Image (cartoon, grey):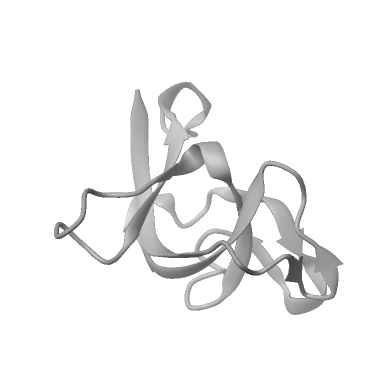
Amino acid sequence: MLIELGQGVVLPEEKVYHTVPVQDGYVVVKIDHVHQNEEAIPLDIPLPDAEIFTLGDARNTRIQWKKSGILIPPIGRSSSIGWCTKADTHPSS
């Protein structure tokens, strides 16, 4: 089971992120919205220099996110993608 954490835009053409190559299995995403109860989710790849450690910190910026944790809706449903995590790794589970 997956839980939606927020929405945003995937940027698959970006191969470098804050001067660092994008890690294998990850893609650059721009976070547009984070659900209120999900703001404290820690990022796998934080940006300490920019003080971006959690999903809430990353709102309106670009981060690396696991490809396996991205759900792309069918054409015509939405222009945003959903950020998800497995329920068993969710802090409120």
Q: Quadrant of residue 75?
A: bottom left
How many callouts does the rendering have?
0
Who is closer to the viewer here, 39 or 22?
22
Quadrant where the image shows the C terminus: top left
Residue 59 placement (x, y as % from top left): 48, 72
Query: In the rendered view, would you say 91 is above or below 20?
Result: above
* For residue 4, side relative to residue 11 (left or right): left
Task: Name the residue: 61% across, 55% down.
Answer: 27
Task: Name the residue: 21% across, 48% down.
Answer: 74
Task: Name the residue: 42% across, 51% down.
Answer: 38
Q: Quadrant of residue 76?
A: bottom left
Residue 20 placement (x, y as % from top left): 85, 67
Query: In the rendered view, would you say 52 is above or below 50?
Result: above
Query: In the rendered view, would you say 31 is above or below 40?
Result: below
* For residue 17, side relative to residue 57 (left or right): right
Who is closer to the viewer here, 47 or 27?
27
Residue 45 placement (x, y as % from top left): 73, 54
Quadrant where the image shows the N terminus: top left
